[in-house]
Image (cartoon, grey):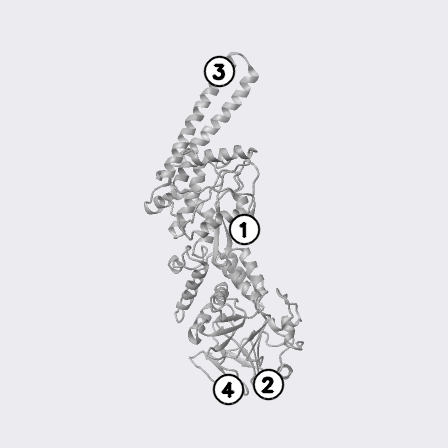
Amino acid sequence: MGITGAGKSTFISHLTKEAVVVGHGIESCTKQILAYPFYYDANTTVSLIDTPGFDDTKLSDHSELEELAAFLKPSYENNIQLSGIIYLHRITDVQLDQETGNGREQQLTSNSRFWGLMRSRGCQIRRVLNTKESALGLVRHFVADGPGLVTLEVQKELVDNKKEFIDTAVGQEAAGQHAEQLRTMKKELEDVKQELKEALKAKDESHALAIKKERARAAQLIQDSETSFQNLHVDMEKRMGLRAKRQDAEIQKLLKLPSRGTQGTASQTSSRGIGMSSWQRLNLLVQEYEALGGKKGFIPPSLSYYEVRWIIKQAKEILLSQPTLLQLPAPTTVFVQIIGDVRGQFGDLIRLFHDVGKPGLQRFLMLENYSGEGPHSLDTFLMCLAYKVNPPQKIFLLRGPLETRREGSLRRDCLERYDKTTLEEIIELCAYLPIAATIADDRKFCANGAMSPELLRLEQIDSFRRPLELKAGSIASDLANGPSTKVTGEAAARFCARHMLSHVAGGRVFARDGYDFVKGPRGRFVILWSAPSFKGWRSASAVLRVVSEKAMEMYVSYLGTHCEIATADGDI
């Protein structure tokens, strides 16, 4: 907070990557409440709330206070509390020598008419330079002391006591100051009228003309001020409702609710409090996913703007530490379960995890296409990312073609519920996904596209630098999207022999039975499909389970069947 030109937007721009409009004149560039998140560290997201300046040329102080109240009221109603308030006061108007400046600072901090009263009640005063380091040091004060949450008196009055803004303590103070200003302006107008009479009496026409203009200006100011003052007594709910609509996008960044028009209720996500660390919120989110297993007609948990961007950031750091060709060891006590095409079917994936074991207890290798044409494409992908980030990180994601598309349901969900920045961050993240994996001493090969006839050595895959662009006809495109030529039994057998593979698993192709084989290599080349609800096709869902270095089994869920077959030296 602070008067216009105090440096609020500049302060925020030092700490965030957002484009904050910074003004240099007497008119405030911030016209409404705006929320800007930034990652303080791996465990902490800080939200900076920019506000219009006091003493604005276009917005009266009481209107500014009401604007703040319109933002703080729904925040408090949804259990979002402040950690503190930063009030900025500029000292750059007049260049002072150090001794004079120190004296002025001492006067401000000790005099109860200025900052003395606030300081006596716990307010701390810090100098802030025009640097990122200085701004970060100020924020560190709030983070270091932990999530000491603050409830403002005006929030209690508006929500708990159900008062109108004019009846709150701050509303009464604003009204009193406004009335005093109005009396002063009327007194000045009377003085101008008297001066005009004297000018007309003296027949000073030029001076009289100037005074008439000043009288008209003063009268207009009084009229505007009286109208503004009367508005304080108008039904606050109507006015604040209009303001809330303007601020809705900013409030939604802080709420644990989806954007308006999407499904979900506050009770679904209220347990993930803003006072928790990001890791605590992630752990609770995973518990919410697990609680959905086996249910019908469920609604995916809603993630806040900050939670989504934090999960993306953590996932990217993990992906950067992994090779382009994942190498998973042979199972000992924990199976490796391979899931095929998901296509954004959130419910199918929830049921699959419920039936075959949740991530964390089992290791999962997911081949691709986490988003698709379902109503919950974004929810499906975010759940996969949440499981990947959440310790012990036993879920591995490979790249498919749908996650890099800038059209379709993933784009729709991102733009409706979050923003374009979130969409671009997800698309960029997918460019870092590995494109293939081997299991059990490189004998079992997995990729969405299953194979590439141009791949001479598996080691070539690790030479692909990420972020990776999938150019048509390239090896990377074959493995992620599927070969440009048909996979025949002869080509599959040749691929297995060239790379000394016992089995190959791929996705990408619809299989009504949940799985299908490429004829030729004795059932060792399998295609997996794990989206039985896709487009209402009512197919089966299959998971290929690697039990040990040699033993494998296929889990097929359609009519409750479970088939255990074969070893690495035989057909699946």
Q: Given the image, on which type of amino acid does mark 4 rest?
A: Ala
Q: Given the image, on which type of amino acid does mark 2 rest?
A: Pro
Q: Residue at x 53, y 17 (%)?
A: 208
- Mark closest to the chain's N terminus, 1 or 2: 1
Q: Nearer the viewer, residue 286 or 190?
A: 286
User: Of helix, strand and loop, which one carries label 2?
Assistant: loop
Q: Quadrant of residue 93?
A: top right
Task: Name the front one of labels 4 and 3.
Answer: 4
Mark 1 and mark 4 in contact? Answer it, CB < 8 Å: no
Task: Name the front one of labels 1 and 4.
Answer: 1
Residue 16, numbered circle: 1
Mark 4 and mark 3 in contact? Answer it, CB < 8 Å: no
- Mark closest to the chain's N terminus, 3 or 2: 3
Distance between mark 1 and mark 3 Cα atoms: 58 Å
Task: Name the front one of labels 1 and 3.
Answer: 1
User: Of helix, strand and loop, which one carries label 1?
Assistant: loop
Which residue is under mark 4?
Answer: 566
Residue 145, numbered circle: none
Q: Residue at x 34, y 44 (%)?
A: 157
Q: Quadrant of residue 477?
A: bottom right
Which residue is under mark 3?
Answer: 197
| Residue 293 image offset from top left, x and y in percent | 40, 70
- Mark closest to the chain's N terminus, 1 or 3: 1
| Residue 412 image offset from top left, x and y in percent | 52, 60
| Residue 231 image offset from top left, x and y in percent | 41, 36
Q: Residue 260, relative to residue 128: is it above or below?
A: below
Residue 521, numbered circle: 2
In the current view of this chain or complex, which residue is farthest to the top? 202
Distance between mark 4 and mark 3 Cα atoms: 109 Å
